[in-house]
């Protein structure tokens, strides 16, 4: 069997400014090292992430490499230095100290002088920890500088976002009108200013086959022209269409995170009359007034229909999806609530015939749940098998420690020499570390399985109560159902959250209800 060595190379946008960190330079340094290795049957693989930050591990090449490590198909990983592998101290340390030793994968950082084979049974010491800390600190400093630079550019009115809003195009860091898209924007505002509802505007755009913003950017030819109400509402309330430059609406939670949070509007950067306006301010104001007026509740009586039934618990609200367009179905605020698609007003749309009563859908789901309870089978036996293996591992670890003590006593008595003692001790320590890693992994897995077992027992109790009362509850739906897809022909496809006991790697499964 050949010895598999993986070269990993990473280059971020900031690193591209440094010649020594170029892809060619990294490859040259690693190839020189490989040429000096005296391994007869070696298979070299190369993985490159070009343009990806090292602050997280959501990179395509590194994920592919780590998957090979998990399947035991990589014997050694070589990088130019620690920063190429990752700049997150906690995650990088986790792979170096836990994952790679568990799968017996050697890790080498050339310019840092690190070889995991030199630290068997050790973490690498303060030297490695200090380098990881410096790497993470460098990433945070770079992040602050980039944020400050973007802030200055935004205050100058430069287009700092990757994509500009629908109706404009970015030219030399500034916004200019994109005429084909701008025509659609003007039509939306004209219809709204003339008193049309958002559903009527969506129907008009569908009739004229106007592409949505995402369809316009993709430019793949055919488009559905199905405009959603939230998209139309956001367009009509966007000041950028009257020439107001707007920036700083969101911010990232932390360095390396892709999650963003919305900033309060008073803290946005706004520059009035900065770029060319698509819509006249008078039309913009009139459109906003009309839409706001239309969105007010129709019934204002003290005990109107909406007020009377809005307080009723709707367990399936937000879970039901249209099988034609993929959008969430809205539910009416009436006594006999009905699910329908927001695109039902669009001519020729398949969604027009999609309507299902909440009570009928709940009845179908309850019937299906009776059959799906078998999926939550005997989880206890699987968990107990893993728990039973823990004492065996503990016995082996204890025996290994006793053997180490016996070796020392034999060495003291002169029965074995220094070389024999060191060799036997190293083998013993390696085996103890291997067993300890396996034990910790099984313990964590058993803990997860026990938690799932408790959840399934709770689920059984909630489901049985629902069957007795013949009604769904929010607690049951949240625990058991991920999504319900409804089709015009009456078919219902349910995606469950519960896991099958014999298929623990399957996150969810679908069931079609007719």
Image: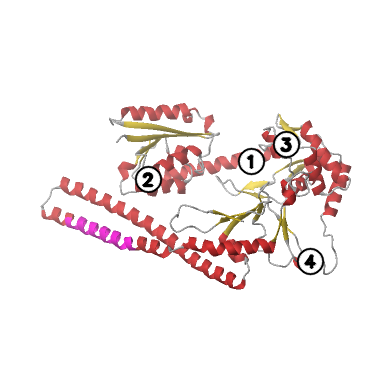
Pick the front one: 365 or 86: 365
- In the picture of the structure, the residue carrying the numbered disc 4 is 307
Q: Earlier in the sequence, mark 3 or mark 2?
A: 2
Question: Distance of mark 4 from mark 3, alpha carbons?
Answer: 48 Å
Tell me the crowding category of disc 1: few under 14, some 14 to 19, or many 20 or more residues within 10 angstroms, Cα based: few
- In the picture of the structure, the residue carrying the numbered disc 3 is 156
Whether the residues at callouts 4 and 3 have beta carbons within 8 Å, the answer is: no
Whether the residues at callouts 1 and 3 have beta carbons within 8 Å, the answer is: no
Pick the front one: 173 or 186: 186
- In the picture of the structure, the residue carrying the numbered disc 1 is 148
Tell me the crowding category of disc 3: few under 14, some 14 to 19, or many 20 or more residues within 10 angstroms, Cα based: few
Residue 273: percent from left, percent from top? 82, 38
Main SS category, magenta section: helix
Question: Distance of mark 4 from mark 2, alpha carbons?
Answer: 60 Å
Residue 266: percent from left, percent from top? 75, 50
Question: Distance of mark 2 from mark 1, alpha carbons?
Answer: 38 Å
Question: Distance of mark 1 from mark 3, alpha carbons?
Answer: 13 Å
Image quarter (top left, top right, bottom left or bottom right) of the N terminus? top left
Q: Residue at x 21, y 50 (%)?
A: 425
Q: Secondary structure at mark 1?
A: helix
Residue 79: assigned label: none
- In the picture of the structure, the residue carrying the numbered disc 2 is 100
**Residue 284 seen by the camera:** no
Image quarter (top left, top right, bottom left or bottom right) of the C terminus? bottom right
Q: Where, by quadrant of the figure, is residue 281 drawn?
A: top right
Nearer the camera: disc 2 or disc 1: 2
Q: Residue at x 81, y 55 (%)?
A: 295
Q: Magenta part of the protein: which range?
A: 388-406
Say whether residue 339 is left or right of residue 146: right
Pick the front one: 153 or 287: 287
Question: Distance of mark 3 from mark 2, alpha carbons?
Answer: 48 Å
């Amino acid at each position: 069997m050949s010895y598999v060595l993986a070269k990993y190379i990473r280059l971020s946008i900031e690193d591209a400014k440094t010649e020594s960190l170029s892809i060619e330079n990294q490859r040259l340094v690693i190839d020189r090292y490989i040429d000096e290795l005296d391994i007869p049957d070696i298979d070299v693989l190369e993985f490159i992430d070009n343009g990806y930050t090292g602050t997280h591990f959501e990179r395509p090449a590194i994920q592919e490499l780590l998957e090979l490590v998990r399947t035991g198909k990589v014997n050694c990983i070589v990088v130019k230095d620690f920063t190429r592998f990752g700049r997150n101290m906690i995650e990088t340390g986790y792979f170096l100290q836990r994952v790679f030793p568990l799968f017996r994968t050697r890790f080498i950082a050339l310019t840092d002088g690190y070889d995991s084979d030199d630290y068997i049974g050790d973490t690498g010491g303060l030297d490695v920890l200090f380098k990881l800390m410096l790497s993470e600190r460098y990433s945070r400093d770079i992040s602050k500088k980039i944020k400050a630079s973007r802030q200055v550019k935004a205050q100058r009115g430069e287009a700092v976002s990757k994509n500009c809003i629908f109706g404009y195009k970015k030219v030399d860091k500034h916004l200019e009108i994109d005429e084909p898209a701008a025509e659609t924007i003007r039509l939306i505002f004209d219809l709204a200013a003339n008193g049309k509802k958002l559903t009527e505007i969506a129907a008009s755009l569908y009739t004229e086959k106007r592409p949505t913003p995402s369809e316009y950017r993709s430019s793949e030819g055919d488009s559905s022209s199905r405009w959603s109400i939230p998209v139309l509402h956001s367009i009509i309330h966007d000041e950028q269409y009257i020439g107001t430059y707007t920036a700083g609406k969101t911010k990232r939670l932390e360095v390396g995170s892709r999650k963003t949070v919305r900033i309060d509007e008073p803290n946005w950067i706004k520059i009035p009359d900065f770029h060319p306006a698509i819509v006249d301010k008078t039309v913009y104001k009139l459109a906003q007034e009309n839409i706001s007026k239309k969105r007010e509740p129709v019934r204002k009586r003290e005990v109107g229909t909406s007020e009377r039934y809005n307080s009723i618990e709707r367990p399936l609200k937000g879970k039901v999806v249209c099988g034609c367009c993929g959008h969430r179905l809205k539910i009416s605020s009436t006594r006999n609530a009905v699910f329908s698609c927001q695109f039902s007003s669009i001519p020729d749309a398949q969604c027009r015939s999609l309507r299902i009563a909440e009570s009928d859908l709940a009845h179908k789901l309850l019937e299906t749940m009776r059959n799906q309870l078998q999926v939550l089978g005997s989880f206890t036996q699987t968990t107990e098998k893993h728990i039973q293996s823990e004492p065996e591992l503990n016995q082996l670890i204890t025996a290994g420690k006793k053997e180490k003590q016996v070796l020392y006593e034999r060495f003291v008595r002169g029965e074995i020499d220094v070389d024999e003692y060191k060799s036997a001790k190293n083998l013993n320590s390696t085996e103890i570390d291997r067993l300890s890693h396996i034990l910790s992994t099984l313990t964590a897995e058993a803990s997860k399985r026990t938690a799932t077992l408790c959840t399934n027992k709770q689920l059984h109790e909630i489901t049985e109560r629902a069957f007795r009362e013949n009604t769904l509850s929010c607690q049951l739906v949240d625990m058991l159902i991920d999504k319900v897809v409804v089709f015009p022909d009456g078919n219902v496809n349910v995606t469950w959250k519960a896991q099958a006991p014999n298929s623990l790697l399957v996150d969810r499964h679908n069931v079609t209800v007719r």
